[in-house]
Amino acid sequence: MTELKITSKSSLYKKLKSIGLSQGLINKTLPNWWANDVLKTNAGILEFCLLVRSRLGLEVDIGESGDISFMPKANNIEFKKRANVEFDKLAASSYLAQGISCAFSNILKSNEIPSPDIQILWHEIQKLEELNLDTVVQLFWKHGLPVIFLDKLVSGFTKPAGMVIKNGDSYCILLGHGQKSPGAQLFVLLHEFGHILSGHLDNKDIVVDVSMNELSGTLLAEYDVQEIEADDISLSLLRRGHDIQGFYSKIPSRPSPARLAAIAMQFGKPLGISVSHLALSYGKETNDWVVAYSALKFIERKAEAQAIIKQEFSRFINRMYVRPDDLSFLNVIQGIED
């Protein structure tokens, strides 16, 4: 066996840190059975390289002399920026996304679950009797489109609002914003779906939405046609194609949160429009986000978006054959205890 030129685990982690991966994050994603003591052996180093390659989507090169280098895969990644976030801080989450996508691709193939027909899925969303985060996430999983929540794994780990990853004919959607409102997260989820439906991943592997102002469809001054297209699809689905100007006209000046919630329910439910979205739309229209988010407490009660996403993940994944290491990895990514 070639003698690998890694003198210590610190030098190995230093190489990974140079491409944006902290030791804490790497250790978080390794299997429970892993122990760094094995890095004292060639076999242990090779095992480590294989794990890093599969879980972080990295290319690992071992030269003829045994020197090891880690490189991001040559994937076509597009960052959609709506806030002042440095792109290099998102390197770790984009690496993780590739590992997550690969894990899901293997799971879907081993369980003979076909790739989603996006046009059919689009029509199925429109036919939902109730349009909320629960029903949409359930529908996505049913059609072979995984949706998971990206937890804040370690200190300093920067998460995007949303991300969609393509792996062959399969897709995976990651939601990373900390907003607990199911209605707010539903906008992001449908926005990511909008990228898929619009063909924005036809010539790329990952689209990363760095942030979204108030998660309501607000764009900054920069003009991005693809973002507008994805927003339009999300808003059209949330509003069922209806004009909501009539909703605004029913709202008195400076309504209480309870009054806003009541008007949103009275206007939205008969039309099948997302009631939470109406409250958020009021916030965008008036910039009165305090009342808008307070109204969500009446509409959504104590429902939490992250809990819904994790629950649906567990419900569907428990029906499938999944390697224990892959299940542990996907649980850790979402902050689910084994």
Image (cartoon, rainbow, N blue to C red):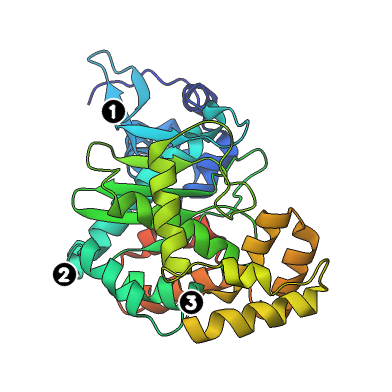
- In the picture, measured across the screen, residue 288 lies left or right of residue 115, that is right
The residue pinned by badge 3 equals 134
Residue type indicated by callout 3: Asp
Q: Position of residue 34 (x, y in %)?
A: 46, 49
Ranked by sequence position, the earlier of labels 3 and 1 is 1
Residue 180 visible at all:
no
Disc 2 crowd, CA 10 A, few/some/many (<14, 14-19, 20+): few
Q: Tell me the mark number nearer the camera, choosing from 2 and 3.
A: 3
Q: Position of residue 165 (x, y in %)?
A: 34, 47
Residue indicated by mark 1: 74
User: Where is residue 108 drawn, in percent x and y?
Assistant: 24, 64
Q: Label 3's element?
A: helix
Residue 72 visible at all: yes
Disc 3 versus disc 1: nearer the observer: 3
Residue at position x 71%, y 78% in the image: 261
As measured in the structure, the alpha-carbon distance from the residue carrying label 3 to the one carrying label 1 is: 35 Å
Where does residue 164 sit, x and y in percent of width and height?
38, 49
Q: Secondary structure at mark 2?
A: loop
Mark 1 residue crowding within 10 angstroms, few (<14) / some (14–19) / many (20+): few
Taking depth in this image into account, of 233 and 297 the one nearest to the observer is: 233
- For numbered disc 1, what is the local secondary structure? loop
Q: Would you name the residue on which mark 2 appears?
A: 112
Q: Is 274 positioned to the left or the right of 112 in the image?
A: right
Judge from the rendering whether residue 126 lies leftward or rightward of residue 25; answer left or right: left
Viewer-side residue, 329 vs 166: 166
The disc labelled 1 sits on which kind of residue?
Answer: Ala
Of the 4 image quadrants, the one containing the N terminus is: top left
- Residue drawn at (37%, 57%) of the image: 193
Residue at image coords 74%, 53%: 287
